[in-house]
Amino acid sequence: MAGDTRLQYLEMVVRQESDTIKLERLQIRMDRQRDLSARDVTAEELYDDTRLRYAALKKELDENEAALEAAKLLLDQSTQRRAEWEGQVLDVDVDDFLAPIRQALNVQEARISEIKQRRAMLALSAPVGGQIVHIFHRPGETVLAGDPVLAITDTGYQRVLAYVDERSAGKIQSGNEVRLQSEHRPERIVIARVARAGAGIQELPLALRKTPVFPEWGFPVLISDIPQGVFLPGERLKVQIKTGAEN
């Protein structure tokens, strides 16, 4: 019957999804053991054992995938025959007759949903599309709940923060034209605008000081209207601001 065929198909799907989760876990373990083995932290035999188990399970999943497609075809054919049969039988309470099978199907579908949720938990999803700027933990490390694993910056909205000396600060206004050029990629040049000029002096970040030991100071200038994808997050730039006093 169509109900029995569908139940068998769902059981195969459950096994396939469960084995897929096992394969992904083996992949994670294999990558971790490979890195640890390369650094002589763990024995190479552990990595070889996990690699062989991964290969065997991968082969089994590939073979079961073909069987799953055949079972799906059989289910479609059985469902079509059931529809034809229900159209002919008028004196049988089909709903009562199929109730136990439908209950078993609901149980299997709930199991599939649970497995898919567990599988989704194995993947890390970033809240935004961007670029990795810092990695806090490496494979093999223990991570507590809530600890950050990666730092990602949003590359879709770019601004530049520059610093000017006290003599130039009074000449800069919002809307002034700015020429930006990459220090390490001089062919990257864009024209932007001053979004806001800081009203107070601030200490420069270490990366911008001539000598990290001695503090330096400057007035911050926020620059916007930068085309997307031209500069990398955190890239050092040469900044030339055109003030109203210039010709």
Image (tube, grey):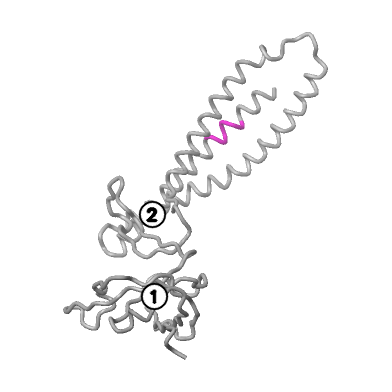
**Numbered tag placed on residue 30 in the rendering:** 2
In the displayed orientation, state which residue is furthest to the right: 88
Q: Is residue 228 magenta?
A: no
Q: Which residues are magenta?
A: 9-14
x and y, in percent, of residue 34 in the image: 35, 59
Q: Residues within 10 Å of mark 2 (few under 14, many from 20)?
A: many
Looking at the image, can residue 242 be seen? no
* Residue under the point 60% across and 29% down: 8
Three-letter residue code for mark 1: Glu
Residue 110: x and y, percent?
52, 29
Label 1, secondary structure: give it: loop
Label 1, on which residue?
Answer: 235
Q: Secondary structure at mark 2?
A: helix
Chief secondary structure of the magenta span? helix
Question: Nearest the camera: 23 or 209?
Answer: 209
Residue 199 in the image, given as x and y percentages of width and height: 31, 70
Amino acid carrying label 2: it is Met
What residue is shown at x 42% (from left), y 87% (from top)?
A: 245
What numbered label is drawn on residue 4? none
